[in-house]
Image: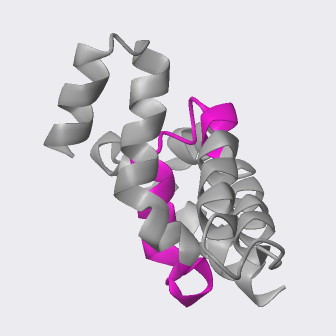
Amino acid sequence: MDLLKEVCERLRVPGECRDLAMLVAKHHGNVHRAKELRADTIVKLFDSCDLWRKPGRFAQILQACESDAHGRTGHEHDAYPQAAYLLRCAQAAQAVNAGEIAQACADKNLIADKVREARIVAVEAAIKA
């Protein structure tokens, strides 16, 4: 990862592109095996990719991972269901109303935990669907 960051800096890669490359390098393994991940791990992936503030970038991460999978000899035309699967999970997690949870939470120190728990439950439901 440090080498990738150094190369990006030397080539003066725009920050947005560098950040995308770093996230793909860090998470492509989990994206490739998405259907093996537990709901809480998927939510951690979403957190790490900042899905909540940058959903478009998450779609780009999935595109890059799909390209990576198709770039492997003999897999050029393979289906890549991981992208649709993770998008379905992402939509479920994004549908959680964090503001509503925050208003209902008596202890304001627990808001982040309650929102995270609700997102995990939503992803679990999406996985079972």
> 14 or 70: which is nearer to us?
70
- Color scheme of the displayed model: one colour
| Rendered residue at 48%/20% (across/down) | 16
Residue 106 appears in the rendering: no
In x, y percent, where is residue 123?
65, 71
Q: Is residue 99 left or right of residue 30?
A: right
> 22 or 3: which is nearer to us?
3
In x, y percent, where is residue 119?
58, 62
State the residue lying farthest toward the front. Answer: 73
Report the label total: 0
Quadrant of the rendered structure where residue 19 is? top left
Q: Residue 44 in magenta? A: yes
| Rendered residue at 70%/82% (across/down) | 74
> 1 or 70: which is nearer to us?
70
Quadrant of the rendered structure where residue 82 is? bottom right
Is 73 rendered above or below residue 8? below
Is 12 rendered above or below residue 75? above
Quadrant of the rendered structure where residue 55 is? top right
Q: Is residue 4 left or right of residue 127?
A: left
Q: Residue 53 in magenta? A: yes
In x, y percent, where is residue 115?
50, 53
Residue 107 appears in the rendering: yes
Magenta segment range? Answer: 33-58
| Rendered residue at 67%/56% (across/down) | 67
| Rendered residue at 51%/41% (across/down) | 102
Q: Main secondary structure of the magenta part?
A: helix
State which quarter of the image contains the C terminus: bottom right
Is 60 rendered above or below residue 84? above
> 93 or 26: which is nearer to us?
26
